[in-house]
Image (cartoon, helix red, strand yellow):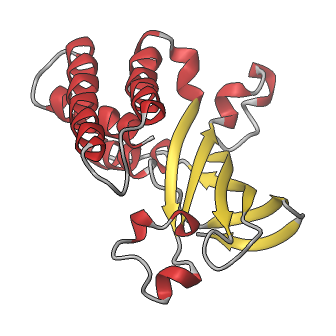
Amino acid sequence: MSTSMATSALAGTFRWSGMDSTTAIWTGASVALLYQTYNEVRDGFSVKYGFSPGDIGANILGAALPVAQHYAPWMRSVTFQISFYPSQPFRNGMYGAIIDDYESTTHWLSFDVDQILPLSARDWYPDWINLALGHSVKGLVGSSNPQHVFVVSLDWNLKRLSLLPDWLRQAFEYLHMYHLPAPAVQVYPNVAWIGLRF
């Protein structure tokens, strides 16, 4: 997921510097994948982590997704997102950085509902409201019963707001990689109204 986000962000930077969009997306994917591969090779020399072929495979898929979206516009209706909210283990000082705590992290797939709806329904649906599916975990520390957690949430696609200047629309495009707080319902392991999901 981080490789996919890095590819998109780097490609945007390369486009701003004057590259054409095809060169920018391939260069962004190459740089992101090269950096992530360096991290995986470095992990291979670590006693704590070790080399993970699964991580390499995930990084390749992550870099490939924005490239595929470049060539297949219909794939652009799905966006990867991430969000963080401090878990109790993180608050207790078990982690030096929140990104290392899987319980504090939620990964999201944001679906651009306006692009998925039939044309006849697009006139009435607000195109700046997406629907997102989130995945997190709980109970990894101090519990004998760790669990997956799945959440369905609204998602604010702010770049779709009308009358935005171009620079702000571009900024919102990258902000959209982060899932902003929104009303949500937990659907697994049990159904529960969350209110605002961070």
Seen in the picture, residue 175 relative to 145 is either above or below; the reply is above
Seen in the picture, residue 100 relative to 114 is either above or below; the reply is below
**In the drawing, does residue 99 fall left or right of residue 46?**
right
Q: Residue furthest bottom?
A: 92
Nearer to me, 89 or 4: 89
The image quarter in which residue 136 lies: bottom right
Q: Is residue 26 visible?
A: yes
The image quarter in which residue 100 lies: bottom left
Query: x%, y% of residue 143?
Result: 70, 76
Residue shown at 62%/53% (left/top)? Answer: 155
Give the number of marks.
0
Q: Residue furthest left?
A: 17
**In the drawing, does residue 178 fall left or right of residue 116?**
left
User: Which quarter of the rendering shows the C terminus?
Assistant: bottom right
Nearer to me, 130 or 167: 130
Query: x%, y% of residue 87?
Result: 56, 78
Residue shown at 44%/48% (left/top)? Answer: 177
User: Which quarter of the rendering shows the N terminus?
Assistant: top left
Query: x%, y% of residue 88?
Result: 57, 84
Q: Residue furthest right?
A: 191
Query: x%, y% of residue 175?
Result: 39, 52
Q: Is residue 128 visible?
A: no
**In the drawing, does residue 59 fall left or right of residue 145?**
left
Residue shown at 64%/80% (left/top)? Answer: 142
Residue shown at 59%/29% (left/top)? Answer: 77
